Image (spheres, rainbow, N blue to C red):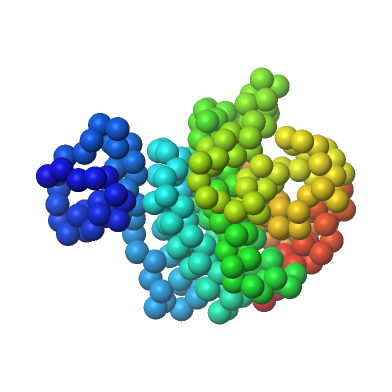
Amino acid sequence: MGISGNGDELQRLVKNGYDSMWIHPGQVNKAVVYEKMARLPTIEKELAPAKRIVNIQEVGAAFTKYLYEGEITDSCVKMAEKLSDSLVACISEDPTCIKEITGLAHHDLYTYLHSIRVSAYATAIAIKVGITDQAHLRLIALGGVFHDVGKSAVPLNVINKQGPLLETEWTIMRNHPTAGLERTKDSLLHHITREIIIHHHERLNGSGYPHGLEKNSILPEVQIATMADIFDALTSSRSYQNKRTRYEALDFIKHRLLRSDVGVDVYKGLIECLAG
């Protein structure tokens, strides 16, 4: 069967049981992505928020794995928007569901789980600091989903290395925000989402990367995503560190990063999320 390569058409065929079809050679990569998107687990919208957010985390991890393996198509962006809308709806319905997010995972899966957890934490923080517009929240959630997509260009032996990175390895790692922006340049992502991708490693005192921006040059939405990124990293099991408890992570941020790396308002927002 020959088809045009339209994403919706491909997804319908996959869901209706077609196991073979003719694809134009120039559309093969996109067709592979469309097929994978169609085979993702379903987000169970009827679940209570505490269980639904765990389901979203599982779907998000599977999606992120596919995202890292192939090109970013319109189908990928649409799926990311569905995930983001589901997170926004779930957390808006019951902010305490954020407590069900867990950092427990084998380190090889960390990168895939991390992005959807950052999206969830960022959404929850945004709500606590006063952002209520659903479209605005979606942009922040999307930023979380895509923020580390540039790590697809970083070798796994660098990402999962036990012990300190060499300077050459740090150079590769620090390039992932730029690589992420490059990977998404042909998509229709909003400016806010793109800012999260490129600047989530900037710090208020100008010590971050890739541009060394200071507080007044970093969007509030980026500062929210940065807080979510740091917190999830601290509370997750990694190849080179044991996970901290939430209390230990908050204490570390308070005494080591507050005001220099992250702002007081987003820190308070995080505490309110976890306190329920």
Quarter of the image that includes the N terminus: top left
Q: How many marks?
A: 0
Q: Residue at x 45, y 71 (%)?
A: 52
Where is residue 177 shown, x and y percent of the image? Answer: 64, 38
| Closer to the camera in the image, 101 or 75 | 75
Which residue of the protein is positioned furthest toward the left in this rendering?
1
Q: Percent x, y for residue 254?
A: 83, 56
| Residue 144: percent from left, percent from top | 59, 54
Q: Is residue 144 above or below residue 138?
A: above
Q: Position of residue 56 (x, y in %)?
A: 46, 63
Q: Residue at x 25, y 51 (%)?
A: 10
The answer to whether residue 225 is seen in the rendering is: yes
Viewer-nearest residue: 197 or 273: 197
Residue 61 in view (yes/no):
no
In this image, 179 relative to 131: left or right?
left
Q: Residue at x 67, y 27 (%)?
A: 170
Image quarter (top left, top right, bottom left or bottom right) of the C terminus: bottom right
Residue visible at 76% across and 58% down in the picture: 220
Q: Is residue 92 left or right of residue 4?
A: right
**Which residue is most to the front?**
4
**Where is 134 relative to 32, above or below?**
below
For residue 31, what is the image quadrant?
A: top left
